[in-house]
Amino acid sequence: MITNKPELIRNIATIAHVDHGKTTLVDGLLRQAGAFASHVQVAERVMDSMDLERERGITIQAKNAAVQYNDCKINIVDTPGHADFGGEVERIMGMVDGALLLVDAAEGPLPQTRFVLSKALKQGLRIILIINKVDRPDARVDEVINSTFDLFMDLGASETQADFPIVYACARQGWCTLKSEEVPALLESKGQGGSLKPLFDTILTTVPAPPADSAGTFQMLVSNLAYSDYLGRLAIGRVTRGTIKKNQRMMRLGENGKTESFNLSALYVYSGPVQVEVPEVGAGDIAVFAGNEDVQIGDTLVQLPAQGEKPEPLPRILVDPPTISMVFSVNTSPLSGKEGEPIQSRKLKERLERETRANVALRMESTDSSEQYRVLGRGELQLAILIEQMRREGYEFMVGKPMVVVKEEGGQKLEPFERAILDLPQAYVGAVTDLFQTRKGQLLEYRTEHEGRVKLEFVIPTRGLIGIRSRYLTETRGEGMFNTQFEGYQPWKGVLLHRMCGALISDRLGDAVEYGLMGLEDRGVLFVKPGVPVYEGMVIGEHNRDNDLNVNPCREKKLTNIRSAHAEVLVNLRGTRDMSLEQCLEWIDEDEWVEITPKSVRIRKKVLESNRRSVIRSERLGYSD
């Protein structure tokens, strides 16, 4: 799949809210364009290559694929739909000239759709609207089209962008049409005789060819990175000018005027979802380069200039600043090294630096301690994904409470705010409004939707959202939808209510015992089960009062005067609350760590010894709510 004619290339991205079907649509495009041989068994959502993406059903990293349709090559970039991964979106938009905007036929455009679409419109991309899931019984196609058009107007789309073609599709069944009157027949036949050919034709007629100069000196902006066990670091980007051949000498133009020459050891383009080695690549195509281990996202690659010539760097990629920070630390607990690899500070630093090089939305800073590093990102989910990846790689480490990134302007303290858009049944509006207003949220809009549902919009401090998602789902009995979008910086709102309850803390090293835990049930909610190893300073539950309480979960029943059988004790133990990684991050206070190992997630106090820390809330936190 090689072409050196820019006019025969189309570069497009997919844009959609989480779970609106863009990865499924890309699967269909790849299959129907013949990207897979007939004998090859292809898994569903082939573009979701990470285990975490398949488990969570979301796209985390932007990925490339390419198909051949008629004489044209179509490069497709699958972008994340969640705002926490906005850095992936912002750097990918410079590689493409058009976008497929997928909108659910029942849910309509949702907040992440707005976020990604605004980035695409600012880049001047041509948009093709795809009304997906038209087979849903609650589909309301006309209303969704009108809502989407209103969204284009709100985001300042040009006349050309607002005049978008509309495609009606069912990506799961692999068909689409440009005529709404054909939808009922296709639904009745379950897509028999239908295909994605109308979408392919629309892409060729709507999306322009890349603006590229085939005759000029080679130039490319690095928009993404990959890694090969055989070739090392790989640079991915769109060639904006000229052609390049394997083994040619090149120059990397880095930050702050830094330059470095290297030999192009390998050259790839995409065929389907895989990389295929080629002898040369021309302007307009998306290519993969090997040969330089220090290349960074935002660098410009050029052909080695002749003596006296000055190379021309392209503008570096800029992304929105991070709003959440979290401290990563070496694991110092008594159980360190028993379930994973206890990493030293040097190895922790190297792992975090590797992540920040591959993701421009993440930053890393040093702290006062040589064993701790502060990582700054766009949201809790982005940092939780990083933690889970490191955990699955076998690392043991600790993380602190997520904190917002504040700044000062004109002597005034400012903090980040988010716009929270909620879609929930009308019966739960009172409880949810009260929940958000206690976190300093301000109600902006109350709108009645279809089928007894209500849409609420709040502006709320980012730190007010930490720990609120699980409580929101509890209040709405799991029926509420919750999405956020960065709103900007506003004056500091003062101390916010976080967690009124204290912690139940183990006062010794050992294994939790049924008898000891049963005696603590009336003191609060337990997080550990019998037989779980504990140590002094480890949090084993939530106290039902606001102060901490040091307890003995290892206490065994004396062997004299036993009145009840072992099975009866088990029946009397009421149970525990299983804390996921995200729940632990939401629950902890500033004086606590979450200890991460490949097998366990534990909560502990930063100071383990009970005689060195206070149990009074105002004293241990340094303030009172």
Image (spheres, rainbow, N blue to C red):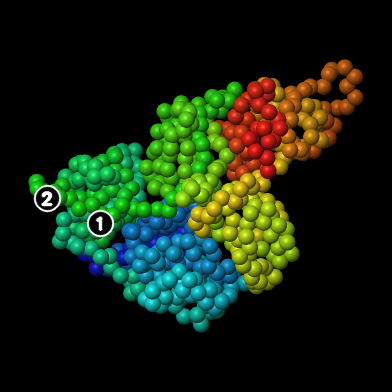
Q: Is residue 127 above or below residue 584?
A: below
Can residue 63 be seen here? no
Contact? badges 2 and 1 (CB < 8 Å): no
Name the residue: 70% across, 27% down: 506
Residue 50 in picture, x, y percent from top left? 47, 47
- Whole-number angstrom distance, CA of label 2 to CA of label 1: 20 Å
Residue 81 in picture, x, y percent from top left? 49, 58
Q: Give the number of the disc on residue 239.
A: 1
Q: Is residue 21 above or below residue 56?
A: below
Name the residue: 30% across, 47% down: 235
Q: Quadrant of residue 167?
A: bottom left
Q: Quadrant of residue 528?
A: top right
Q: Give the number of the disc on residue 309.
A: 2
Residue 57 in picture, x, y percent from top left? 53, 53
Tag 2: residue type?
A: Glu
Task: Check the image and name the residue furthest to the bottom.
Answer: 181
